[in-house]
Structure formats: structure tokens, C-alpha cells
Amino acid sequence: MELFKNFKQVLGFEGTEEMNETEDKIMVEMEEETIEEKEEEKLSVSSLPRANLESNVYNSDENISDYQTIFVNPVSFEECKKIANYINKEKIVTVNLENLTNESAQRLLDFLSGAMEVKKARFITVSKKVYVSVPDGIKSYVEDENNQIFG
């Protein structure tokens, strides 16, 4: 409020009732925004406490070859080359296709199927839009809804 008083003095509005009402409205709006921001911060995922996993999460300064499992959420077909490189490096790659159209998702899966054929990897379907590429030689355990086990 002190800031507004200083502005009023400089601009010659000291003592006008209209400015006091405007000032009060602005202060109330600012307080409401601050309260909303604090509420949003409480609800945001980034503010949730995390188990000490952050040291195991890749950041751009590190070498991707240090990781065995990679999770990708492609937003365009053009990302298929990057994902194919992960498959070529024999990483376990989980691909979430929810951000793609059905046509782009099918094209991406077709492209990745070719890369997987070369490396003798296999796809495991987790859901309609989530797949996991498992390299040859990696044992995996998958239990489906009928409790059938696939190796």
C-alpha cells in the first residue's frame, strides 16, 4: 500500500477517494491471485515430495548410455528416429502414443517394428496406446488379464 501512496503523491492524486477505492480493488485482486497461486502450487505435481529418485533420472548433461530403460511420449512421427536409436542401443523403451493421431501412431509403430526386427527386439502391449520394446536377451514377465504368463 505504501507504494501506491508514493505513486499518488508523485502524480498529484493524494487524498482522492476514487483512488482509494481503486487501490483497495487492486490490493484485493493481488491478494486473491497470491492465494490462487499458493493453492495451485500445493496441487501441482512438481511440489509433491519425491522419493530420492531424482539422482536416477536422466538430464541433458548426462550420457543416455548409462540408462537401461527409457520412457518416451512422442508428439510427432519425426521422433521415431530418436526412438529407433534407443532400440538400436538395446534399451528397454516404453512408448506412450497418447499424444499422436491414430495414423501417426500406426506409422511410428510400423517404423519401430522395422528397427526392432533388425535388433530382434519384441513389443509388449501395455495398453491400447502404450508399448514397450524389449531387447533380445532380456527376460520379461508379463501377466495378462487371463493370468497367462508370457516370456
Image (spheres, helix red, strand yellow):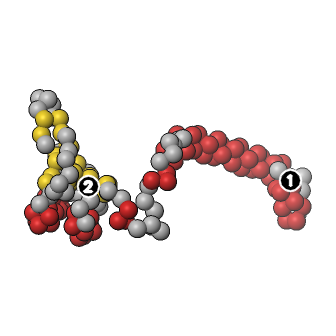
Residue occupying image coordinates x 47% and y 48%: 53
Dot label at residue 64? none
Q: Secondary structure at mark 1?
A: helix
Residue occupying image coordinates x 11% and y 32%: 148
To which quarter of the image does residue 11 belong? bottom right
Instruction: Report if the CB atoms under discs 2 and 1 are less than 8 Å apart.
Output: no
Residues 66 and 34: in front is: 66
- Percent x, y for residue 13? 86, 59
Classed neighbour count for the residue bearing mark 1: other residues with Cα under 10 Å, few (<14), some (14–19), many (≥20): few
Dot label at residue 2? 1
Comes first in the chain, label 2 or label 1: 1
Dot label at residue 92? 2
The answer to whether residue 110 is left or right of residue 49 is left
Q: Secondary structure at mark 2?
A: strand
45 vs 148: above or below: below
Indicate the amino acid at tag 1: Glu
